[in-house]
Amino acid sequence: MNKHQTLDKVLGIQYPVIVAPMFLISNVAMIKAALDAGVTAAFPALNYRTDQELRDAIAEIKEHSDKPFGVNLIVNKSNPKYKSQLKTLIELKVDYIITSLGSPKDVIEQAHTVGAKVFCDVIDLKFAKKVEELGADGIIAVNNRAGGHCGNLSPADLLKELRENCSIPIISAGGVANSEDINNAISMGAAGVQVGTIFIACEEAPISQDYKQAMVDYGEKDIILSTKISGTAITVINTPYVQQVGTKKNFLEWLLKKNKWLKKYVKMIIMFRGMKKIEKAALGATYQNVWVAGPAIESVKSIRPLKEIIGDLVKGL
């Protein structure tokens, strides 16, 4: 695939934008609204607890629109549903799959048999080259301004490194809030962008009003990086609860993760506990508010329909 081809041409959409797959947040209503607004969107397979719920979600979106949408798949051992979810996505022929946290080899091989594309999350050149060699159709370049599990490099540095060394399309993920950000990314070699944070407070999102209001009330200065929540670096709003528990792993967590025999299991337990805490905070009232967001929170000024947010985002493209 031509590295210079923009995402709108690759997927046959109006604007080179993916509404990011967000844990607990992305749902059918958001995907449908995004497709109607001229962009594409994806949701995490893990947002649906059963295979039937996943199938029903895909069917409802396909019935609503023939525009392309995707599903995000966690491809390592922390996702026990990985194999069954992949089987369903291939059977139902989703337009593209976004892979995270592991080798996309099986996904790429199987997706290509049904004409589906595979875009792979990467945070550095090393992994980008690996997925390119495996046959990925594009790279999701997760930079240090992404919400949730972010990368280490700035958008400019990561794009430069990937652009100079990779020959497949690069989709910049992190820190995008308006058309100027999109144009900047494309001028630096991106084929398009993946955008998440500015959509968290959309009316369609199935999260609590407290979480949505926090997106309005807090700003970029309130976004911090925590390794305490899920065991790996994740960006969250610096609420009083987050301040209370701290952002660094405690000694026991650090010690267990250093033990090669226990490391894998401890990592899974810490991540599971952290994700459960995030889920509780996102979906209901709790004093343990762990709300995930990125620096683009600065641009969120009100709770609005997703279509309206997209309209402002692509204005000027």
Image (tube, grey):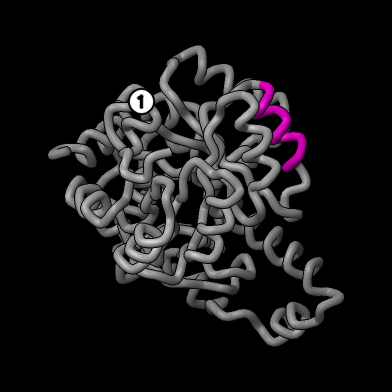
Mark 1 neighbour density, 10 Å: few (under 14) some (14–19) many (20 or more): some
Side (left or right) of 180 relative to 139? left
Image position, residue 149 (x, y; %)? 51, 61
Specify whether residue 83 is painted magenta. Answer: yes
Dot 1 corresponds to which residue? Answer: 12
Quarter of the image where one finds residue 306: top left
The stretch of residues the image draws in magenta is 82-91
Amino acid marked by disc 1:
Gly
Who's the residue at 51% across and 17% down the image?
Answer: 62
Who's the residue at 59% across and 69% down the image?
Answer: 232
Camera-side residue of 113 and 229? 113
Side (left or right) of 233 relative to 67? right
Q: Is residue 76 above or below residue 36?
A: below
Specify whether residue 70 is painted magenta. Answer: no
Image position, residue 307 (x, y; %)? 29, 30
Extreme residue in the top direction: 63
